[in-house]
Image (cartoon, rainbow, N blue to C red):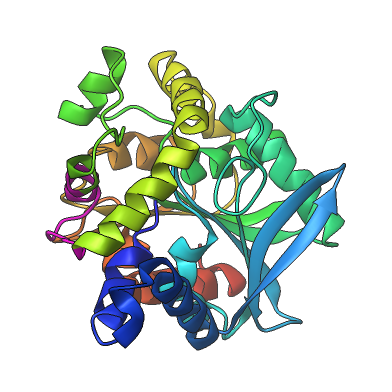
Amino acid sequence: MKFLLAIAATVAAAVGGYLKYPAKVLDGAISLQRRVAGLTHRTRVVDGYTWHYLEGGTPDGVPLVMIHGFAGNKDNWALVARALGRNHRIICPDLPGFGDSERRFDLSYDTATQADRVHEFLLALGIDKAHIAGNSMGGMITLQLALRHPELPLSLALLDSAGTSSAEPNAFQIAVENGETPLAVRTLDDVDRALDLATYRTVRLPKKLKQVFFEDIKEREELHDQVFGEIAEEATEGGLDDEIAAITQPVLIMWGREDQILDVSCTELLDERIARSRVEILDKTGHVPMMERPREAARIHADFLADVAAGRI
């Protein structure tokens, strides 16, 4: 989900063209955010499919690949990219079906298939070893990468990750198990509801920017419904609970204590079954810590990566 809209709204308020051209103002704000983060938009065709991604950081550094969540995109990582890029080459892709990447109804979007696609994309970039980070759905794809292509990840960072059970399922998780789609945005008011679910602090967008956001979501609605259905089916079938003990890489488990989408108790099973794990729980934080608390999230992740490099975890 384009939570950078909340940041862009602050910029937009001071721009004279906002009232007439809110979409252009938003695009300009996102471009500015990329420049500040040291990120460049690139494309790469892999097996006939065009990937869009952001690249930055230290060109000869060890790659750090960051995978967004459901309804998210590559820009979700912009606020932490500059700090993490001091020692790493940063790669933030738009997953197939999301962001600027192609949206096709003839493809499967389950997390195992997406993980295989990410693997092929990285090989096309010449990357056969990398640190991998994922948020929400992207966290489950990160887990799948470690399980299906264990030679690739040097470490994993799971930020409010999907893919495993929680000791105390919350209302969102119970709704999904009952076949509901709590993140669906069918009306303009649903934009506020979705933001309230995803973040700890209330975020309210200016009306014209909210309209831009809503129109963007409606264009993707049918495909996103398909993707959500595939992910929900994976979750209700038990996810990766029985498989994650096979993960041998160091794993950072970072969670927002007030996450209303995936309860913080998910960390218990992850920490219990993954041998080399470290848990960091952020107070007053919801489902997207890299956007809600970017400085703290970047510091925690950077410290973890330094410890991995030094063999301390």
Residue 238 seen from this side: yes
Residue lying at 38% horizontally and 77% vertically, measured from the top left: 299
In the picture shown, does residue 209 fall above or below 30?
A: above
- Specify whether residue 279 is in view: no
Looking at the image, residue 264 lies above or below residue 172: below
Of residues 284 and 305, which is closer to you in this image?
A: 284
Q: How many marks?
A: 0
Would residue 243 be counted in the magenta stretch?
no
Name the spot of residue 248 as percent of width and height, x first: 60, 44
Asked whether 30 or 281 is in front, the reply is 30
Relative to 121, say whether 207 is above or below: below
Who's the residue at 48% across and 87% down the image? 36
Q: Nearer the viewer, residue 135 or 48?
A: 48
Which image quarter: residue 237?
Answer: top left
Seen at 73% across and 82% down, the residue is: 59
Q: Position of residue 159 (x, y in %)?
A: 39, 52
- The residue range painted magenta reads 192-206
Q: Position of residue 279 (x, y in %)?
A: 33, 54
Question: For this rendering, which residue is in front, 30 or 201?
Answer: 30
The spot of residue 265 in percent (x, y) is 23, 38
Q: Residue at x 22, y 53 (%)?
A: 286
> Relative to 107, is 121 on the left or the right?
right
Where 210 falls versus 296 (above or below)? above
Quadrant in which residue 238 is drawn:
top left
